[in-house]
Amino acid sequence: MTTAVVVGSQWGDEGKGKIIDLLSQDAEMTVRYSGGNNAGHSISNAGQKIALHLIPSGILNKTSRCVISNGTVINPEILIAEMNNLKQHGITIDHLTISDRAHVIFPYHILQDLQQENDRRTIGDPLGTTKNGIGPAYMDKIQRIGIRVADLLNRDKLNQQLKFNLMQKQRVLDTELFDQLPPLDELVEKYYQMGQVLKPYISDTGSVVNQAIDRNQRVLFEGAQGAMLDVDHGTYPYVTSSNPVSGGACIGASIGPKAIDHVIGVGKAYVSRVGDGPFPTEQDNSIGDYIRETAHEYGVVTHRPRRIGWFDAFLMKYSAQINGFTGLVINCMDVLTGFKTVKLCTGYKLDGQLIDFYPASNEVLNQVTPVYEELPGWSEDITQVTSFAELPVNAQNYLNRIAELTKIPIAGFSIGPDRDQTVQIQNIW
Ligand code: IMO
Ligand code: MG
């Protein structure tokens, strides 16, 4: 058996898609286990970029089964559009499987998301969500009023569930928002029809994944978002509503914890964050601006400029702890080329004292002073490098220091956005 989970180690957008693209070439199955269309990455196919939000990047590998498992929340309209887009690009999707247990995002979830963000904005404290209805869909799941993919296939049950849900939403939503919703019959018909489109792909993905594991196949679990956006471990409430951490793969893909062999944490050589919330190493200055423009750090989903900061090894240690990383991939090393010196945050000071835990309180996180180590930078063009040894010594030292501080070996690094600009050090398959 060889299984691996690829997890975002920071606040999302770490370039997970690139690593998953690489590893899924030899995977026999790729499984997306949490989140919804709040995630965004683009894959390159014959020189064309295709944006994906729900479908695993492994879709390009025809021999690898692609699974959207129970832990995800699915907006069927978006999923079908994504499927059609792939087909239009000549990419077969016959190897796609969608969980009957995944929860469905309805238009009222999006309105609830908007309403809550607008209300929070009036008190000056928005979360900066992607406004895709992710949080409200997970709320309904926990509240036990959610509608699952399997329910889309039963018109009578769907009618009954939607009738009840509309009653509930009428109590929650402002009248002007509620009135934007289509009437019950229309909603039932539309979602039933989308269920029919998805029907050939729907199955009990838990069995599918466990059978693959029993057959000793190479199974790759594709994380979305990042550990610091985890609803339990991240900077709550400035998080997403699911568990992107490696453990989320167990619940979100119906597997036991012993079924996971490798946990690859993906990070960037610096840190980015889109949306609100604390960010101790943030560089809201010319350094951040330079990195943002050099690396085009703008969101794939919402096109918002991303906030930028120095690499935070203290955060990464915490991330390693909650994920159990067996290897670390550091992306975007090329972006740091040209800095005279580069900084690594090794710890946080609170009232002049180093702390030895990652604070739960955002007020505390906003108060801490990051402690930096300054390392000599590199100016050589590293974009064509094909091995660790070819890196300039200062870039090697930078990666070695990250491994030393986090106690996690470097599994790979990237030196540019192209497919062949990733150097793999650990071979997991
Ligand atoms: P990928 O998979 C970066 C952030 C949002 C917001 C918070 C809550 O591309 O790394 P939500 O819509 O999930 O309720 O928003 O989480 N967020 C992400 N940030 N990358 C992502 O996904 C994200 N998914 C959600 O910006 O701060
Ligand atoms: Mg993103």
Image: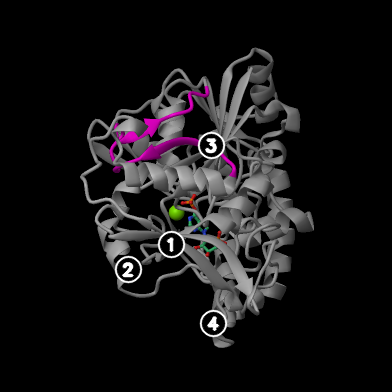
How did the renderer colour the structure? one colour
Q: CA distance from mark 1 to mark 2?
A: 9 Å
The answer to whether 61 appears left or right of 390 in the picture is right
Locate residue 235 relative to residue 338 in the image: left or right.
right
Q: In this rendering, does residue 229 appear at all?
A: yes
Local crowd at mark 4 within 10 Å, few (<14), some, or many (≥20)?
A: few
Sooner in the amino-acid sequence: mark 3 or mark 2 = 2
Query: Which structural element holds mark 3?
Result: loop
Q: Nearer the viewer, mark 1 or mark 4?
A: 1
Q: CA distance from mark 4 to mark 2?
A: 28 Å
Which residue appears at 24% of the width and 30% of the height? 46
Tag 2 residue: 287
- Mark 4, residue position: 121
Q: Residue at x 40, y 45 (%)?
A: 397
At x 61% / y 72%, what residue is drawn?
349
Q: Is residue 49 above or below residue 220?
A: below
| Circle 3 Cα neighbour tier, 10 Å, few/some/many (<14 / 14–19 / ≥20) | some
Q: Residue 161, percent across and down?
A: 73, 53
- Image coords of residue 72 (percent x, y): 61, 45
Whole-angstrom CA distance, mark 1 to mark 4, is: 28 Å
Crowd band around label 2 with a 10 angstrom C-alpha radius: few (<14), some (14–19), many (20+): some
Q: Amino acid at mark 3?
A: Pro
Cα distance in 3D space between marks 1 and 3: 20 Å
Mark 3 sits on what residue?
409
Give the number of the disc on residue 310.
1
Which element carries disc 2, helix, strand or loop? helix
Element at badge 4? helix
In front: 36, or 104?
A: 36
